[in-house]
Image: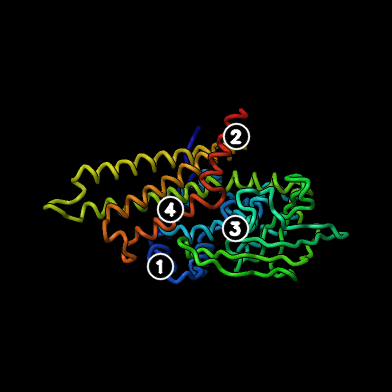
């Protein structure tokens, strides 16, 4: 395995680091407090090439390898996980097209994202079907050259701002995963209604809302991967997106460690910096060990994806472990800060709230373990 970055990857990582320091960190607390959408940040990110990492250069994108993208995402997430989640939603929405779309679909849809700033959404989760993808109830039926979609989705990132929504629906629930189809639906289609915006615990800068589809008419040209292949499309997309979530979790954990180191060197108790106490040193050492381990697991999954190797197990390794590391690191950071850690005037309580979502979305920590168990038992 070779984790070396391309020159383009190194340059974009440096750009991301500078962008995070200048454009994200100074405004992160405000967007978190108000729960507003950071459109101004995304305008600047799009301008400097920090969006749409997965879109091939053939369609105007950056065409970064997954490995190169991970180091960029870590820098962004270090500044604010919520801002990063909505930024990455475009890649999530577009992976089905990139992996399974026709040349015509790629040319028609992907180029829109690179010509101007638009947002995309990936809409799979439903009120009664989260981890159980096969249990989705959103229905689709064929009507000549069109498909009619009806149902409700929830926890859809960028729902209020997206131009396109990548939607999964079933033609026949009795067919299980073989009945699921994937469509790209223009959000301005008649019958698409965005519901309530979620008032979230963390990652509050990221827009999250429900979406209702009422007899929405979609052209057959917007079916991705063919009839009955939606489950395959969704699983392949998650294999590609989970390393992104994992490295974002690494970014959160790294921010927690950096804040903890700085604070422990400055804060004095009993006549000396608290960094001199073994209890604090052990907490910092554990953070460093786990962050490096999570990063390496993620880089391995990213490298395998770049080699076009199926890596469901490795993607779940990375996502599961990194999310848990982020939660432990941020919780310990709050502890190191003591009473100040519990105050919104200091950054670590936000990191802890942001970290919790990493254990939930794109497959819970428990589902990741089920996936891993299935993979090792079937190998």
User: Farthest residue in the top direction?
Assistant: 379
Regarding mark 2 in the picture, which secondary structure is present there?
helix
Residue labelled with disc 3: 90
Mark drawn on residue 27: 1
* Structural crowding at the residue carrying mark 1, measured as other residues with C-alpha within 10 Å and reported as few (<14), some (14–19) or many (≥20): some
Up the image or down, 261 lies above or below 203; here it is above
Mark drawn on residue 116: none
Regarding mark 1 in the picture, which secondary structure is present there?
helix
Q: Position of residue 60 (x, y in %)?
A: 63, 56
Q: CA distance from mark 2 to mark 3?
A: 30 Å
Regarding mark 4 in the picture, which secondary structure is present there?
helix
Q: Position of residue 231 (x, y in %)?
A: 70, 46
* Chain-order first, disc 2 or disc 3: 3
Tell how many labels. 4
Q: CA distance from mark 4 to mark 1?
A: 16 Å
Residue labelled with disc 2: 374
Residue pictured at 16% horizontal, 55% vertical = 268
Residue pictured at 82% horizontal, 57% vertical = 141
Please say whether residue 11 is visible from this viewpoint.
no
Mark drawn on residue 75: 4
Are discs 2 and 4 less than 8 Å apart at CB? no
User: Farthest residue in the right direction?
Assistant: 144
- Comparing 48 with 279, the one in front is 279
Are discs 4 and 3 less than 8 Å apart at CB? no
* Chain-order first, disc 2 or disc 1: 1
Q: CA distance from mark 2 to mark 1?
A: 42 Å
Residue 4 lies left or right of residue 192; in this view the side is: left
């Amino acid at each position: 395995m070779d984790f070396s970055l391309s020159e383009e990857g190194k340059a974009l990582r440096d750009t991301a680091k500078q962008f995070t320091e200048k454009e994200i960190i100074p405004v992160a607390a405000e967007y978190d407090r108000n729960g507003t959408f950071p459109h101004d940040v995304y305008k600047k990110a799009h301008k400097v090439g920090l969006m749409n990492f997965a879109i091939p250069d053939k369609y105007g994108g950056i065409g970064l390898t997954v490995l190169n993208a991970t180091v960029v995402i870590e820098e962004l997430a270090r500044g604010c996980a919520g801002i990063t989640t909505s930024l990455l939603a475009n890649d999530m929405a577009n992976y089905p097209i990139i992996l399974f779309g026709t040349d015509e679909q790629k040319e028609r849809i992907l180029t829109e994202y690179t010509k101007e700033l638009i947002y995309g959404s990936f809409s799979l989760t439903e009120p009664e079907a989260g981890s159980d993808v096969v249990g989705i109830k959103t229905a689709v039926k064929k009507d000549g050259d069109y498909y009619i979609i009806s149902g409700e989705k929830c926890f859809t990132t960028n729902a209020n701002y997206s131009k396109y929504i990548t939607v999964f629906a079933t033609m026949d629930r009795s067919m299980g995963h073989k009945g699921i189809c994937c469509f790209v639906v223009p959000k301005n289609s008649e019958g698409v209604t965005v519901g309530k915006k979620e008032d979230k615990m963390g990652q509050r800068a990221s827009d999250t809302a429900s979406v209702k589809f009422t007899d929405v008419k979609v052209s057959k040209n917007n079916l991705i991967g063919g009839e009955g292949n939606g489950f395959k499309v969704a699983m392949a997309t998650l294999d590609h997106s989970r390393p992104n979530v994992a490295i974002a979790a690494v970014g959160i954990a790294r921010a927690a460690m950096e804040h903890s180191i700085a604070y422990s060197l400055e804060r004095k108790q009993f006549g000396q910096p608290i960094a001199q106490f073994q209890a604090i040193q052990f907490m910092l050492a554990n953070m460093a060990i786990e962050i490096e381990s999570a990063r390496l697991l993620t880089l391995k999954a990213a490298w395998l994806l770049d080699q076009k190797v199926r890596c469901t197990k490795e993607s779940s390794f990375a996502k599961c472990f990194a999310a848990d590391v982020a939660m432990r690191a941020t919780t310990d950071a709050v502890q190191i800060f003591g009473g100040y850690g519990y105050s919104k005037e200091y950054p670590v309580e936000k990191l802890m709230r942001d970290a919790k979502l990493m254990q939930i979305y794109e497959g819970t920590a428990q589902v990741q373990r089920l996936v891993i168990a299935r993979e090792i038992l079937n190998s």
